[in-house]
Image (cartoon, rainbow, N blue to C red):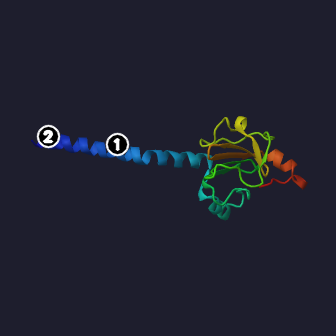
Amino acid sequence: MVGARKATAVVLGGAAVAALAVMVGPAAIQQAQDRMDQTMRYPTGAAAKAEEREVPSWLPDTAVRIAFLTGSHDGDRLIRATLPDRALPAGCTEGRPVGAVHLRAHWFPKDAPQRATAHCGLYDVALIGDQLYGWQDAAVAASARPGGLPVH
């Protein structure tokens, strides 16, 4: 009887550990990936612009689940935002990409450049459903600014 109780306790303990791993595992994996690629995350566009001076001003305050990545020193940028109204931000214009994607992040689709249809500021962007994916190529941004300084 003691052996059966021990076996039951081991099985239940193992099941509890497995359930915890399923619940916590994906978030822990995402945090580890974010640290590797130095992604910053924000709950809203307003919060992102308040905390990070490099977040583009065209990002709507109402955007949610923002992921933002900057190159270490060259001005390349990636951004992902959920746009609840599924519309490009005000001031964005239609057009094919002019810059290349030089950064990589697990949350940024590799086919975003092929799906891009607009420009928001100096970012090339693709709106896929309610997800906006954008990138800024430092060389393009520098050439658009007097003196060659990166543009946000």
Q: Secondary structure at mark 2?
A: helix
Answer left or right for 3 relative to 102. Answer: left
**Residue 64 rendering spot, x and y as whole percentages:** 60, 55
Residue lying farthest to the right in this orientation: 146
Mark 1 vs 2: CB contact within 8 A? no
Residue lying farthest to the bottom in this orientation: 50
Residue at the spot of label 2: 4
Classify the position of the N terminus by image quarter.
top left
Answer left or right for 29 relative to 1. Answer: right
CA neighbours of label 1 inside 10 A, class few (<14), some (14 to 19), many (20+)? few
**Residue 44 rendering spot, x and y as whole percentages:** 61, 59
1 or 2: tag closer to the N-terminus:
2
**Residue 33 rendering spot, x and y as whole percentages:** 56, 45
As drawn, the label of residue 10 is none
Answer left or right for 91 relative to 85. Answer: right
Residue lying farthest to the left in this orientation: 1
At horizontal 47% and vertical 45% (from top left) the residue drawn is 26
At horizontal 44% and vertical 45% (from top left) the residue drawn is 25
Front residue of 57 and 150 = 57
Residue at the spot of label 1: 18
**Residue 147 rendering spot, x and y as whole percentages:** 90, 54
Query: Which amino acid type corresponds to the residue marked 2 in the rendered image?
Result: Ala
Q: Secondary structure at mark 1?
A: helix
CA neighbours of label 2 inside 10 A, class few (<14), some (14 to 19), many (20+)? few
Front residue of 22 and 83 = 83
Answer left or right for 65 relative to 77. Answer: left
Label 1 – label 2 distance at C-alpha: 21 Å
User: What is the number of callouts on the image?
Assistant: 2
At horizontal 74% and vertical 55% (from top left) the residue drawn is 90
Query: Which amino acid type corresponds to the residue marked 1 in the rendered image?
Result: Ala
